[in-house]
Each structure stands twice: as structure tokens, then as C-alpha cells.
Amino acid sequence: IAGITQAPTSQILAAGRRMTLRCTQDMRHNAMYWYRQDLGLGLRLIHYSNTAGTTGKGEVPDGYSVSRANTDDFPLTLASAVPSQTSVYFCASSDGTNNEQFFGPGTRLTVL
Amino acid sequence: GQNIDQPTEMTATEGAIVQINCTYQTSGFNGLFWYQQHAGEAPTFLSYNVLDGLEEKGRFSSFLSRSKGYSYLLLKELQMKDSASYLCAVMDSNYQLIWGAGTKLIIKP
């Protein structure tokens, strides 16, 4: 692994289903982030984690949950997917909260 | 509220110079970032400004004026591969990045 990986690359999901998007980094970065990107809007922060064992809510946290059991992994869970959660999801990490963020390749999620 | 404004789309000619502007109103300021994002790909870091002035990095330069809430990204000697979206982001007082919607740059031969 080099950098950040995300899985799956894309997914079509029925409304009401539970879904976990996976994110793994091998850079030993303390901080990790989940964003969603929608056409015409900037990236919006869903949840973040400044260090393993801690998480925080971003701008649009409703309907999403995260965990940070270790430094490398930061999964994002949609408990009961809704069509408005159709988006491209990016995971990112940084070595310090005011340093540049490195992004994973993204997960394209469609909720029908 | 917090707001980042940048033009939606710009067109420029290969070999020319283009300036992409960004204005911001945020709660606190801990630096301004520029990222490049090619279609269907992840954003990649271009530059970071925290003090007023110009930062130059090869063909790309970024300028910041904190008193005016203003930044620009200057791209020189444009190449076709520079066709991408350019994202302006400001780190607020909570050390969270607030993102603009991005400027789609189209390069014509």
C-alpha cells in the first residue's frame, strides 16, 4: 500500500441498506477525514479524527458514523442509506491538523 | 457564515497565463490551500499560504492578502494537462478546511 486506499471504488445501494466505506493509510498520519463531493458544491467535511481513539463531527455528519480504532483505518458507515447520500466520498489524511491533506481515490456511491 | 468564492469556469490558451481568484469569509484563518483535481480523480495539493505575499513553485504561484480575504493562483506557460478543477480551501479557527466549489479550467490549443 502506498498512501491512502479506499474501498469499494463504486457501489450502487438500495435505500435503507447499511453500508461501510473503508479507508486505510500507511503514512502513519494522525489526522484523518471523510468528505463528500457533490456537483456545484465544495468538498464538505462529514467526520474527522485528530488521532486514534478520537472522532469529531464535521459540517454534514447526520446519517453517518465513524470509528478510529487504530492509526491506519477510518471506516465511514451509513446506517440506513438515503438517496441524498448519493455522492463521491473522499477519505483524506494529514500529518498534523494544519498540514496538507492527502486524498484517497474516492468511492462513488449511488443510493436508489 | 463561512464562504469561499471562486469562478465556476475559466478558459485559457495553451502557453498563456491564467489567474484564478478566490475570496473568503471564514471564522478565523489558519492558512489557505490550493488543490488541483482532474476529472474523476482525487484532489492533489498545490500550495499553502499563511502569510501575505506570493509563493512561487515552478509554473504555479499563489498569492495571499489576509486583510482583503483574497488569494489567487497563477498558472504560467499553460499546458493541456493543466485542464482540471482548481480548489481553494481555507483552514478556519477549528483547523477544519472550508472548501470553495472549484474553478474548472479549460485549456484550448
Image: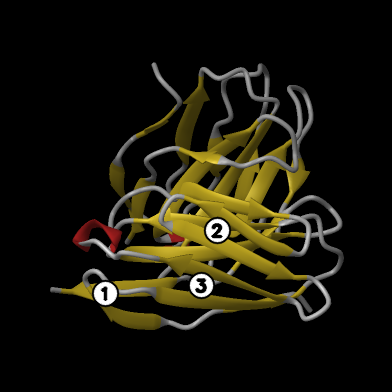
Q: Residue B83 location, x and y as percent?
A: 27, 64
Q: Please give the label number shown on residue A88.
A: none
Q: Residue A86 location, x and y as percent?
A: 40, 61
Q: Chain of mark 2?
A: B
Q: Dot 1, crowdedness within 10 Å: few (<14), some or many (≥20)? A: some
State which quadrant residue B78 falls in. bottom left
Q: Which residue is mark 3?
A: B101
Q: Dot 2, crowdedness within 10 Å: few (<14), some or many (≥20)? A: many
- Tell me the kind of residue under disc 2: Trp
- Tell me the kind of residue under disc 1: Ile
Decide if residue A84 is in sight here. Answer: no
Q: Which residue is mark 1?
A: B106
* Identity of the residue drawn at 47% across and 42% down: A18
Depth check: give the residue in front, B101 or A20: B101
Of mark 2 and mark 3, the one earlier in the sequence is 2
Depth check: give the residue in front, B69 or B27: B69
Decide if residue B12 is in sight here. Answer: yes
